[in-house]
Image (cartoon, helix red, strand yellow):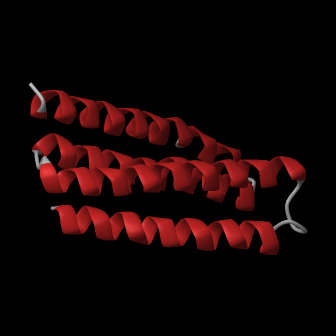
Amino acid sequence: MSKSILLIATVFLILAVAIGAFGAHGLKNHLSNEMLQIFKTGVEYHFYHALGLLLVGILSISMPSGYIKWSAIFLSSGIILFSGSLYALSTTGIKGLGAITPIGGLSFIAGWILLLVAVLKHFK
């Protein structure tokens, strides 16, 4: 489990750098300031949660549990749904994609709550 989480976190971090660079250099002349800010928010949350996922992977080495596994799944889903919907919204202008963003935010929250439960159970 730890290896998979660490590999996924690393891939998400690579993608965050690549997508962030694409936004900063490739999109700045093609998007409005509002849409560029939305894109940047997606990159920001992508980075934060990919780093968090890396932490979850490291913690899973010393405290493996189903809660850790589900924390990783929810954080990964959050990156895809939250950041992915913001990337898509900002580059296509399809406003309906913004309806997906809160589901990603809830996935982030669930992932962090599951990590909290894992820590509390481990140090009980």
Image coordinates for residue 79, horizontal then vertical, percent: 47, 52
Picture residue at 61% right of the left edge, 74% below the top: 18
* Visible residue check, residue 94: no
Picture residue at 23% right of the left edge, 67% below the top: 4
Give above or below for 21 relative to 97.
Answer: below
Q: Quadrant of residue 118?
A: top left
Q: Relative to 2, is 52 on the left or the right?
A: right
Give above or below for 29 relative to 50.
Answer: below
Image quarter (top left, top right, bottom left or bottom right) of the C terminus: top left
Image coordinates for residue 101, horizontal then vertical, percent: 55, 41
Q: Quadrant of residue 117?
A: top left
Picture residue at 56% right of the left edge, 48% below the top: 45
Image coordinates for residue 92, horizontal then vertical, percent: 72, 60
Tell which of 106 and 123 is nearer to you.
123
Q: Relative to 73, is 88 on the left or the right?
A: right
Image quarter (top left, top right, bottom left or bottom right) of the N terminus: bottom left
Picture residue at 14% right of the left edge, 51% below the top: 62
How many numbered marks are there? 0
* Visible residue check, residue 85: yes
Give above or below for 60 relative to 29.
Answer: above
